[in-house]
Amino acid sequence: MPGEPPPIEIRGLTKRFRRVLAVDDLSFSVERGRITGFVGPNGAGKTTTLRALLGLVTPTDGEALVFGRPYQELAEPIRQVGTVLETSTFHPGRSGRNHLRTVATAAGIQRARVEELLELVGLTAAAKRRVGGYSLGMRQRLGLAAALLGDPQVLVLDEPANGLDPEGIRWLRNFLRRLADEGRTILVSSHVLAELAQTVDDVAIIARGRLVAHAPVETLTARAGGRTRVRSPQAEALREALAADGIEGAPLDDGALAVSAPPERVGELAAANGIVLHELRTESSSLEEIFLQLTGGDAAVPR
């Protein structure tokens, strides 16, 4: 609703560990019902930011807020924020079901919710097994179930795809989209950029603790610009027409040309020269390419 604070807001966040500036005046927000990817090189400050948001690290300056409040001031955190951290641990001797029951009992949540979530994350068949025998992917699913016990509206996930096979990653993508479609707000950090691009609505990119980009994925890829891909049975004539207009056409492995000009201009030149085109489209930059452009692969600051 208008006037309400965003579910997640990082405002001027700075965190210094002695001589190391881990996060430097970082600001961005995550809107309701959207999935935001939080990415940066190793050591960029992602984990420090998430830990500050969850009250595990005290900011040197600035704020990290959930529904306009520091995490420590939330009345019932488990019912407002669900978390899956890379450092999440489980008692290896407990079964998956008993782990969830223990967390639920401590939070005053009914056991029926445990069974509901075991089915939701696909662990019903493994619920009696000890967590110590779970694969990494199964532990990730168990962590998601624990995060959802209180039916929170905000989820903060640190590398949730870690350990998942391709089928598991596809399951996670659909799972998170379903949660967002229910109106939940999701902040997810990941280093698997190709997969992240298929999952998130927005992306916040940081380097050396500072924000370098925050926008919808489509906006970022369009802003970064790409190349025009064109294919014609008259490839040589097309290259000559492009060259005459000062446009370079680089041949690709499949016989198409990669052209550094807008598709509209390429189409106009082809039409003016009577050249038939079988393909004409823009190839936008991938999230990984944009990430490398914006960060330069920099990873100089410890996490």
Image: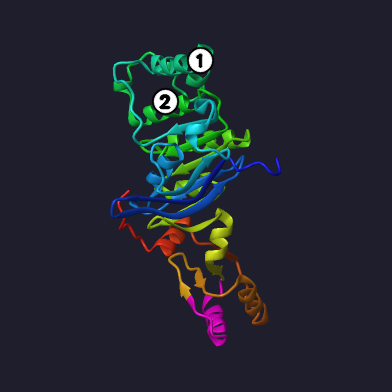
Label 2 sits on what residue type? Answer: Leu
- The structure residue drawn at horizontal position 31% and vertical position 20%, both measured from the top left corner, is 91
Would you name the residue on which mark 2 appears?
142
Quadrant where the N terminus is found in the figure = top right
Q: Is residue 180 left or right of residue 144?
A: right
**Rendered residue at 37%/27% (across/down):** 139
Give the extent of the magenta segment: 233-249
* Residue in the picture at 58% in, 56% down: 218
Label 2 to label 1: alpha-carbon separation: 19 Å
Name the image quarter holding residue 234: bottom right
For mark 2, does the 10 Å Cα neighbourhood hold few (<14), some (14 to 19), or many (20 or more) residues? many
Residue hosting label 1: 108
Residue at the right extreme, as displayed: 2
- Type of the residue with mark 1: Gly
Q: For the view shown, which residue lies furthest in the bottom direction?
A: 244
Q: Depth check: 130 or 209 in front?
A: 209
Quarter of the figure with residue 274: bottom right
Q: Which of 101/217 is in front?
A: 101
Query: Is residue 184 shown in magenta?
Result: no
Queried whether the magenta region covers residue 247, the answer comes back as yes
Judge whether 235 appears above or below 69 on screen: below
Whether 131 is drawn above or below 282: the answer is above
Image height of 189 relative to 95, above or below: below
Q: How is the image coloured?
A: rainbow
**Residue 48 placement (x, y as % from top left):** 38, 45
Numbered disc 1: secondary structure: loop
